[in-house]
Amino acid sequence: METRAPYVLIGSFVLAAIVAVFGFVYWLNNTGGIGPRTNYHVQFQGPVPGLLVGAGVLFNGIRVGEVTQLGLVPDNPRFVNATISVATATPVRADTKVGLEFQGLTGVPVVTLEGGVIVAKSGELPTLIAEAGAGQSMTQAARDALRRVDTVLQDNSGPLKDTIANFKTFSDGLARNTGKLDGILAGLEKMTGGGAPAQKVTYDLRTPQNLGPAGKMLSASLAIPEPTAVAMLQTQRMLFAPSGDRPGFADFLWADSIPKLVQARLIDSFENYDIAHAPLRTSDLGQADYQLLIDIRRFRVATEGETRAEIGLSARIVDKNGKVIASRLVETSEKLDKVEPAASVAAFDAAFARIVKELIGWTVQAV
């Protein structure tokens, strides 16, 4: 007896554990216990695919019971009767909505209850009527929709064939008249100003080449920063006084904004005069002994009185300490016989050449 006693104890423990597991599962499936339940009759007005006895019952998404019985209605086989057992505390009303929901990837069906405000008479348990199509799954709904679409297509097969034939006739007509349509569209583009934008024409300011023999050389390093100018001069368009648009200049552009263009051509001109001591830009490495500061006052075509191209610059030379050692106003103009882009640019080239010669001579004397 002493030898067999441990086996009896072990068997008893295992049996108790199994009973405990089954009890726990039963407790989970019955919403936390085996408290008081109330049975309700539910009638589905259609098929309930996959619904089984023991399926869960949810009220507003919370499990409150399970299905206890399923059966067909004898006098109407399309209907299905079900009995559900739910916790007595569940607020089921006479107008509670009943449905069938398919959960998870496998589509396990559960009975769903929602809302309701009409309280049933005391002692009377209402029969809950599910909405038509409550048991219809997504797959079944898709099949029904496709079946209805197929029916519509079959009923209208003749008109659809006529419509397709008309489209083919129309497309054939377009293909035969492609050239005419292109001509019509091109004409509309011209009338409305559409189509590709006009190509801009870029003009450059010419660097003077013949600056005469190099006399005195630059004895110190010189930098020419980008000239300053009012906002109106920060442009690539040709400027006029009085201001306004002129015929032939709609597509005109300088090669760069006026201050940057003047800076580049001034440096080029100093290089042509004395390449060995050419000035720097302030962005270049190293610090120059002097800076030639330019402020652009005028760079325009004046049309009042004699038409002319005008250039006006204010120049200052400052040392490393920011002290102004020399300053000068340099202004000139060139007569313009015809106000058109090429003639205007040629006039600016001539005026700029005179400005450059005067600036170079003055600068090499000052530094």
Image: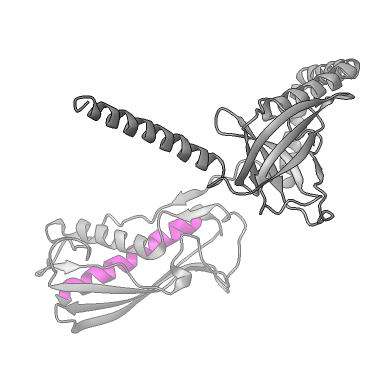
| 18 to the left or right of 41 | left
Image location (x, y in percent) of residue 245: 61, 63
Image location (x, y in percent) of residue 26: 52, 38
- Name the residue located 32 percent from the left edge and 28 percent from the top edge: 11
256 in relation to 35, above or below: below
Q: How many marks?
A: 0
89 in relation to 20, above or below: below
| 360 to the left or right of 302 | left
Instruction: Depth check: give the residue in front, 148 or 332.
Output: 148
- Name the residue located 25 percent from the left edge and 61 percent from the top edge: 267
Instruction: Depth check: give the residue in front, 303 or 229.
Output: 229
173 in relation to 342, above or below: above
Q: Quadrant of the C terminus?
A: bottom left
Q: Quadrant of the N terminus?
A: top left
By secondary structure, the bulk of the magenta-drawn segment is best described as helix
Visible residue check, residue 254? yes
Q: Magenta residues, as a range?
A: 343-365
Q: How is the image coloured?
A: one colour
Q: Is 357 inside the magenta-drawn segment? A: yes
Q: Is 156 inside the magenta-drawn segment? A: no
Residue situated furthest left in the rendering: 219
Image location (x, y in percent) of residue 49: 70, 25
- Name the residue located 30 percent from the left edge and 67 percent from the top edge: 226
Instruction: Depth check: give the residue in front, 265 or 42.
Output: 42
58 in relation to 5, above or below: below
Image location (x, y in percent) of residue 188: 76, 39
- Name the residue located 13 percent from the left edge and 61 percent from the top edge: 277
Visible residue check, residue 47? no
Instruction: Depth check: give the residue in front, 77 or 193.
Output: 77
